[in-house]
Amino acid sequence: MTFKRSNNPGEDIKRGLEMPQKRRQLIAESPADIPVAVYGVNRLAASLHPGTLKAKITDKQPVGVDCWKITLKSLREDGSFPFFRAGQFVTLSSEVHDSFISRPYSIASSPKQARDGRLEIIVQKKGVFSSWLIDEARSGSIITVSEPSGDFCHDDIRDRGHVLAVAGGSGVTPFISMMKAIREGSEDFRLTLVYGVRTREHLLIDPADYQDERISIVPVLSDQQAEGYYNGFINADILSQFIEQDSSVFMCGPDAMYDFVTHELNKLGVTRIRRERNCVTDRRVDREEIYRLTVHIRDEVYALTARNDETVITALERAGIPAVVRCRSGVCGFCHSRLISGEYYLKPEDDFRRQADRKFGYIHPCCCYPLSDMEIEIPIFDL
Ligand code: FES
């Protein structure tokens, strides 16, 4: 209710004196419910960080050897996927037989394709979830996709104008997204991709598809001699030809490649290497033990079993409990849970907990293996 002054002071005083009465009348006539205001900034935040969303598989194409490119279509109202930085990953999850399983995959499409509601990932036939995606999920199957996460991206403040990217096998995926983003203009840096695979048939990309003056691709074949390709492992000799005085080094591939290439880069004096973390997998044990796992989620208590060679998250998923999980490598902290009792094994290199979490007994169940009966309290589902 607003008051506008007129040219008649007497009239203004009269209207002013009537205002309290009018205001009381308007209040009496208004609905009892408090109106809910939706601010633009909240709408934007919900669109960028939806937690999870549903998506439909629209296409599956074999690429290279034992790998498939899977295309997903967003089922959000506006048909888009949330914005992401080239190099980030999403975690896919679904009910698989009697379990509820998830796995992170680097995004192979560009941020622009995501805006158009299309997301591509490359899946290697390895592990239960990936094999299910390849063999059993069909075009039209609906799965849950997390919002994008991860910091394996180029950052203008932190990184240099030239990136030496070292990839092995399907580890090329985040660099595919980066190359598309460079060509589309949403990223602005030069990228030299040294890409190691066994034979030409294992290549997941055709270098001709990424022609750009800011992009160079150097394929290295470990098990085949071919004209125009380097042969052997990615070693200091090869890397020294492409690293610049002022390059940022990014690496994504199998653990064995990390060990070897890190050693080779160290020979060149390079110690700062940005690595994409791989999922923590099952652990080799001399004797399989089975323990009781008691899980509290809000007011519910679940009693299940967990093996000493599987992570606590895997035990939860095997029992059909959809735990909150993203990176499965101990880094993101999404699965952060309170340990009430019990012993567990955690590789020191997978321990990315904050000091306060260590002190107050929090664990990341995605990388902890039970060593006794355990009782934990986990965050609520985000589905
Ligand atoms: S899922 Fe990222 S730390 Fe466990």
Image: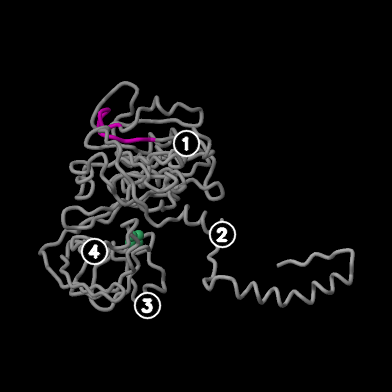
- Which callout, 4 or 1, points at the residue further toward the start of the chain? 1
Q: Along the polypeptide, which appears first: circle 3 or circle 4?
A: 4
What kind of residue is marked 4?
A: Ile
Counting residues from the N terminus, which is met first, the one under dot 3 or under dot 1?
Answer: 1
Q: Amino acid at mark 3?
A: Phe
Secondary structure beneath dot 4 equals loop
Task: Classify residue 337 as left or right of residue 87.
Answer: left
The question of residue 199 being in magenta is answered with yes
Label at residue 39 = 2
Residue at image coords 22%, 43%: 137
Query: In the drawing, what numbered circle is on residue 191?
Result: 1
Residues packed near mark 2 inside 10 Å, few (<14), some (14 to 19) or many (20 plus): few
**Residue 360: mark:** 3
Q: Which residue is mark 4?
A: 321
Mark 2 or 4, which is nearer the eye?
A: 2
Residue interval drawn in magenta: 194-203
Cα separation, mark 1 vs mark 2, equals 40 Å
Q: Secondary structure at mark 2?
A: loop
